[in-house]
Amino acid sequence: MRINGFSGMDIDSMVKELMTAKRAPLDKLNQKKTTLEWQRDSYRDLNSKMYEFRNTKLQQTYRLSSALNTQKAVVAGNTDAVKAEAGGTANGIKMEVSVEQLATAKSIVTDGKAQGYSSRQSLAELANGIKFGQPTTSLTDGDLTKEYKIKINDVEMTFTGKDTVSSVITQINSKTELKAQASFDDLTGKFSIVAKDLGSMGVLDVQPPSAGNNLLDVFGAGSTAVITDIAAKDAIVKINGILLNPAPTSNIITYNGVTMNLLAETVTRDSSNAITGDKPFTITTQSDPDKALETMKSFIEDYNKILALFNTKVGEEKYRSFQPLTKDQRSAMSESDIKLWEEKAKSGLLKNDDILSGLTSTMRNIMSEKMGELSNIGITGGKYFENGKIYLDEEKFKKAILNNPQQVADIFQGSGASTDSSIFGKLYNEMDKAMTKIAERAGTTKFSGDVNSIYKEESVMGKTLKGYTREITALERRLSDMESRYYKQFTAMETAMSKYQSQASSLSSFFAR
């Protein structure tokens, strides 16, 4: 805190006036830094939109083979026994399907600890017969450090008494090389291990450990668990009276272009397991262009929307006279005025941006290169002033997709190894390249669309902002020293003036005598 001197001068005001001019370079630095931060935020917002278009729209929706599929599977009869989806190669042959046996996986299961145990308990608790909720004071350090082992498909794993059942299951299930899944039933205390693959393709070999305690014994009613081996089964399926041979090793099968997910047997059995009846389901296919049409309408809407956004950002007007406000300027303005000012100041941050300009040009070229083929299926370009906008003639597209669905799919999705040369493939790759450039410049990430993600400091902008921060800190230190020096000088001046006034007063009183 500073107190004005007694000379009658307003030293604070004078120092403030002197420092105003000196602070101009600092204000400019802060404005440059703020502008760069705004620009970086604009890149991050765009990155989020690009991520959504590239991943959510192109990769996870439009590039899927089902997106432009015109075939629809119709199930009749025992509809609870199957889910069916027709692919683009569906040939329309009617199929009557009987399922005598579903494919099952090979598994092993213990006889169980009985009810009262939980997967939240430790192996030590189960091994010592302590039920869930009972005191564990009887457990010793030896119980907690005791090792339990299991060997699954030639991979041996070791656990200790303090490991919980749920953590044991998590560790087993996380090892992809085991090709097996473990589970625990709280109601019966049974521990199961199931092969990931169904039927004869599934591999499950559970052996006692080479040495030490067998993990499975923890889940037995006695000191040694009784293990039940359950053999794998291949599916037994008949289509139009023809038994599938070889037998399917999965419950998901594809015939005549239709993928069937078998959910239940269609046959009924008596007490001796002999088949007594059958309620099959039938599958037919029919042409249905509506889904493909909706896909194309959605794509064109998304394409036009993101292209318009890029064009807007590239052509947005830049108001150079509207710079970020300083603290003094903000304090002198109302909230509404600040908002209006910053709208102008933030306009044109990406005007003529080279990354966006290049991407918009490439996107337009991708469409224009195929415009001859596209016009034949009802897709045309807009006027020159619409900056690449495209339009869809729905009726013409529906006719084209019904007459030659593969041609339409090839244009947009490609086929075989040529998917990257298709429209969707090229757009995905170009969007990916642009996002990589933005990441290098602004420090965003192309693997996330989070608008609150943290920037990488080693980007071009990140390094520039670090430089601004260093310059601002150094300049603030110099200005603080300068301000202190001004106050010292004024203080010295006041001291001298005070002495002069004292001397003058003494001389005046001397001559007055």
Image (spheres, helix red, strand yellow):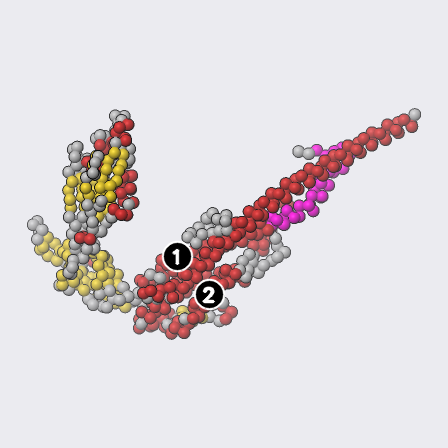
Q: Judge whether residue 135 can be spotted in this image.
A: no
Towards the viewer: 358 or 177: 177
Q: Name the kind of residue labelled 1 in the image.
A: Asn
Identify the secondary structure beneath mark 1: helix
Classify residue 214 by image quadrant. Answer: top left
Residue at 55% x, 50% y is 464
Taken as a whole, is the magenta stretch helix, strand or loop? Answer: helix
Return the x and y of residue 320 as percentages of the image width and height: 61, 57
The answer to whether 478 is drawn above or below residue 146 in the figure is: below
Q: Position of residue 429 (x, y in %)?
A: 41, 61
* In this rendering, position of residue 383 left or right of residue 105: right
Determine crowd level at label 1: few under 14, some 14-19, many 20+ residues with C-alpha closer than 10 A.
some
Secondary structure state at the residue bearing disc 2: helix
Asked if residue 6 is among those painted magenta in the image, a careful observer would answer yes
Q: Tell me if label 2 and label 1 are in contact, CB under 8 Å.
A: no
Residue at point 54% right, 61% down? 352
Image position of 346 (left or right of 359): right
- Classify mark 2: residues with Cα within 10 Å, few (<14), some (14-19) or many (20+): some
Residue type at numbered disc 2:
Thr
Residue sitting farthest toward the front: 210
**Residue labelled with disc 1:** 55
Sequence-first disc among 2 and 1: 1
From the viewer's perspective, tell me whether residue 184 is left or right of residue 463: left
Region rendered in magenta: 3-31
- The image shows residue 105 at horizontal and vertical percentages of 19, 49
| Relative depth, front residue between 471 and 512 | 471
Q: Quadrant of residue 250?
A: bottom left
Report x, y in % for residue 193: 21, 44
Identify the residue position indicated by label 2 in the image: 362
Q: Is residue 18 visible?
A: yes
